[in-house]
Amino acid sequence: MRLLRKTADNFTGHDDADAAVVYEGMNSSALDTTALINGAAYFYKVYDFDGAVWSTSPSVPATPDTDYGIFGADVLTLVRDRLFLGLKAAVAAGVVSHKNGSVPCLTAPPLYENTVWPVVSLHLNNDAPEVRGIGELIQSDVINDDDGIDESEGWISRVSLQIVVWALNPDERIALRKAVKSVIIGNLPVFDDAGVVNVEMSQSDVDDFESYSAPVYQTISSFTCLAPSVVQSSVDVIGDVTLTQAA
């Protein structure tokens, strides 16, 4: 089989010198990714040689484009949002105190002068493949309503976060540490629904008497989980090509 590509539908035959040879071999399918421009129209034509004569098919138009989306939640964003809501509820219930009515959940260390304490910060420690599949498939391809195929490529990641409680006295730290743990446990069904599984967390207290103008009491929580890292895309398939003997 020989698959040719041109920017105009004016193929002259299997040996068209102006056509790009996309594929030549025995396979019944081919993927074209070389020297394509998104939004530009191309034409494809299949030629088949049976050892004596060439057969051909009607040309088929196609236009490449970027079409993909990230599937699955960003773990840090998901955990930050759930912590913010859970700690806001803890403040409303009187379990944790904060004069603004909610504990800020930051993605960077706080600045002492511009911070209303206590606060929580989250940091990504690591996001790396843990489980790989043959062909990097997360789930089977699905035929969509446009007769194309929705593909899901990626892997299962082991994600590690660091959740830091920042407080100005030890009692405040204890209350916030317990609240953080409770929010994480209470949201296990939410994490599971988002594909974030095997959640584990460990906590340890740290005191910082040097970095700021007043003592800062911290709890360092190490949060780990497994989560899907998947890109989904829709692929238009050219199929059911009928070959006829070339003139």
Image (tube, grey):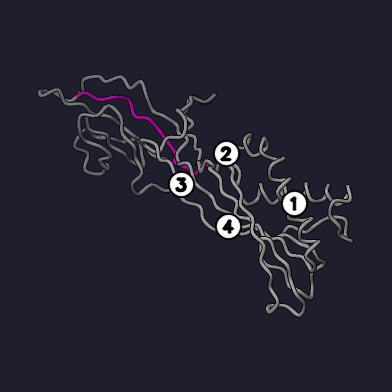
Residue 113, horizontal then vertical, whole percent: 79, 76
Q: Residue at x 70, y 40 (%)?
A: 187
Q: Is residue 106 above or below residue 35?
A: below
Find residue 197 and name its label: 2
SS for tag 4? strand
State the residue position of label 1.
178
Sequence order check: which comes first, mark 3 or mark 2? 3
Which of marks 4 and 1 precedes in the sequence? 4
**Tag 2: amino acid:** Val
In depth, the one of 123 and 200 nearer the eye is: 200
- Rounded to the nearest whole Å, what is the CA distance between mark 1 and mark 3? 52 Å
Q: Where is residue 231 in the image (x, y as percent from the top left)?
A: 50, 41
Q: What separation in Å lies between label 1 and label 4 (alpha carbons)?
A: 21 Å
Per the rendered image, the range of residues in magenta is 55-68
**Location of residue 187 with respect to 106 vertically, above or below:** above
Q: How far apart are marks 2 and 1 (CA)?
A: 22 Å
155 over 176 or under it: above or below: above
Q: Earlier in the sequence, mark 1 or mark 3?
A: 3
Mark 2, residues whose alpha carbon is within 10 Å: few (<14), some, or many (≥20)? some
Q: Position of residue 239 (x, y in %)?
A: 37, 24
Marks 3 and 2, Cα distance to the nearest angstrom? 37 Å
Disc 4: which residue: 124
Query: Label 3, on which residue?
Result: 38
Report the residue at 72% width, 78% height from top. Answer: 212
Q: How crowded is mark 3: few (under 14 residues within 10 Å), some or many (20 or more)?
A: few
Task: Place residue 100 in its image quadrant.
Answer: bottom right
Residue at (72% x, 68% y) in the render: 110
Three-letter amino acid code at the position of disc 4: Leu
The amino acid sitting under disc 3 is: Asn
